[in-house]
Every structure is written in C-alpha cells, then in structure tokens.
Amino acid sequence: MTDSDGERRPAGELETSVLAALWAAGTPRTAAQVRTAMPQPLARTTVATLLARLHEKGVVDRLPVQRGYAYFPVEDTHGLTARRMHHALDQGADRHAVLARFVDGLTSEDEAELRRLLAETGTADGGPAD
C-alpha cells in the first residue's frame, strides 16, 4: 500500500488509524463505520482486513451483527503500548540488552517514574512481578 506521493506508509500506520477510530467511537463499530471515521480514503474491504488482522492479534474483539461483525478495542492506547513492549521483549532477543538500551534512552524524569513504579509494585528488589 502506498501514500498518494508513492511512498510506503510506516508499518502499522493503518492499524493505528483503525484503532484510533475505534477508541474515538467508544462503542463497537462495523468495518464500514470504521472506514467512515478514518482520515485515509480506504476501501471497506481493506478496513475489514485490517480489523480481522487486529482480531487475530488479540488487539480487538468482535460481536456478530447482521452479516458481519462489530469490532471494539480490547485495551486502551497505554495497554496496547505495553503489550507491544512485552511482545518485542518476547521475540527471542537478548532481554538484558534490549532493556538496557531502553533505560539508557530514558529521560531523568522517566527513569525516576520507572523507579517509583518498580518500588510501588515491589519489583525493584527482584520481588514478584505480578
């Protein structure tokens, strides 16, 4: 898929637009309803395919309506970001290296917030993560 100027869209851009439309709606939406709410001019079948893929990934769930489905997000944007971070860590990469680089890129404010959250959940001292 390409933009109007012939450049490829960044990975996940359309899925993000679909999710934004679902989050804004606040109620389950069909592919046609999502398509209408999106800023990009896409075919209904493209939106339906994106929704089906998001459903397969567990990012959205669906309810049967008429001859199709109405979709709704399983998580808010923060939960989705956390899910993506966990997914990236679970891809078989060196977890230590990935986390170390992530921490190296934090601002001092973000690092302080991370330390506070770890202390709050009891994981800063190697305690249980749940």
Image: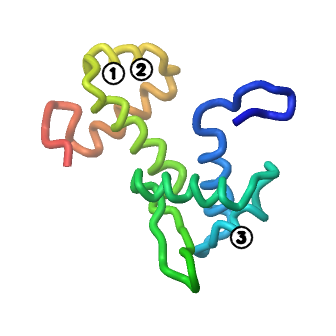
Q: Is residue 35 left or right of residue 123?
A: right
Residue on which disc 3 sits: 33
x and y percentages locating residue 125 in the rendered image:
16, 31
Residue on which disc 2 sits: 102
Q: Is residue 20 above or below residue 30?
A: above
Q: Is residue 112 above or below residue 77?
A: above
In this picture the colour scheme is: rainbow
x and y percentages locating residue 27 in the rendered image:
60, 75
2 and 1 marks in contact (CB < 8 Å): yes
Q: Residue at x 45, y 51 (%)?
A: 79
Front label number (1 vs 3): 3
Q: Secondary structure at mark 2?
A: helix
Residue on which disc 1 sits: 99
* Residue sitting at the far left: 127
Amino acid type indicated by mark 2: Phe
Q: Report the front residue among 52 and 22.
A: 52
Which image quarter: residue 101?
Answer: top left
Q: Secondary structure at mark 3?
A: helix
Q: Residue at x 49, y 80 (%)?
A: 64
Amino acid type indicated by mark 3: Gln
Report the label total.
Answer: 3
Front label number (2 vs 3): 3
Q: CA distance from mark 2 to mark 1?
A: 5 Å
x and y percentages locating residue 54 in the rendered image:
49, 53
Q: Is residue 124 left or right of residue 5?
A: left
Amino acid type indicated by mark 1: Leu
Q: Is residue 44 left or right of residue 84?
A: right
Q: CA distance from mark 1 to mark 3?
A: 39 Å
